[in-house]
Amino acid sequence: QQQVKQSPQSLIVQKGGISIINCAYENTAFDYFPWYQQFPGKGPALLIAIRPDVSEKKEGRFTISFNKSAKQFSLHIMDSQPGDSATYFCAASEYGNKLVFGAGTILRVKS
Amino acid sequence: DGGITQSPKYLFRKEGQNVTLSCEQNLNHDAMYWYRQDPGQGLRLIYYSQIVNDFQKGDIAEGYSVSREKKESFPLTVTSAQKNPTAFYLCASSIDAGGNYEQYFGPGTRLTVT
C-alpha cells in the first residue's frame, strides 16, 4: 500500500520559533504534495501545496521544501504563533489517483 | 455560503444499529469522499465517488456503504458489520477526482457507538 510517513507525531515550539514537519514517500509517481491544517473539531483545510518541478514554495510564513532525490518534503512555519497550534497533515497523490495522507503532527506553539 | 455540510456534529448509537451520516455540498463538485480519522492514524479513505450513481471502495470500506443519487449528496451508512465504528468521520469534495485538485472538507461528524 502506498504510504506517506510523517514526523514528528507531536511538536512543541516557542512563539516566534520555527516549526518543521517532515514527510517521506516511496512512490516516485507521486506528483502533487499538499499540506492540510486542521483545528480541533473542524475539518482539514488546504494550507499549501507543491508539485515536484520546484524545490520550494513559500506562502507567507509557510514554506514547503521538496527534495525529489531523497523523496522527502517538509513544512516550515516561520515565526510560529499560538494561532498556528493545530494538526498538520502532509499528503501525496499521483495524477488521477487518490490522496494518501500522513498520520498527522500535532503542533503546539507556546506563548 | 458555499461549502460542505455534515450532520449531525455528534451522533450516539448502540452497538448493532446501522447509522447514516449526511454530507451535502453546494460547490458543484463532481467528486466526493468519505474519510475516517482516528488519533495517530491520519485520514483513511472509506469510499469515494467521481460521478452520480457511481462510487468506489477506498482503503477501509468494510462495514460501510454509500450512495450517490444526487450530485450534491453523498451519505455514508455505518453498518453493524463495522467492528470499531467509533471515530471522527469527514466528508470532502473536489472539482473532480481525475487530477490533483484541492479537497474541501466538511466539519465532520463524531460517531460514538456503545
Image (tube, coloured by chain):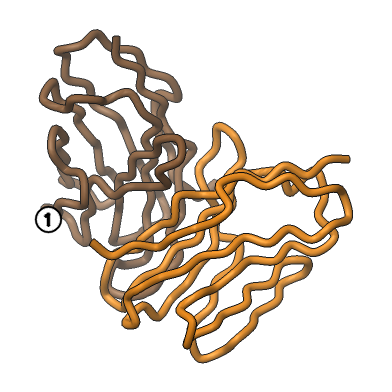
Chain colours: A orange, B brown
Q: Residue at x 81, y 55 (%)?
A: A80
The residue sitting at 28% across, 49% down in the picture is B45
Location of residue B31 (image quadrant): bottom left
In the image, is residue A89 above or below residue B18?
Answer: below
In screen coordinates, is B67 left or right of B93? left
Near-viewer residue (B77 or A36): A36
| B98 or A59, nearer to the observer | A59
Residue shown at 47%/72% (left/top)? A33
- Looking at the picture, how far across and down is residue A2, in whole percent? 28, 65
- Residue B80, image quadrant: top left
Residue B58 in the image, given as x and y percentages of width and height: 20, 52
Count of picture labels: 1
Q: Position of residue B101 (x, y in %)?
A: 41, 70
Residue at the spot 14% in from the left edge and 12% down from the top edge: B16
Three-letter code for the amino acid on which mark 1 is drawn: Asp
Q: Which residue is label 1 attached to?
A: B54
Q: Badge 1 sits on which subunit?
A: B
Q: Is residue B72 above or below residue B101?
A: above
Which quarter of the image is occupied by the C terminus of chain B?
top left
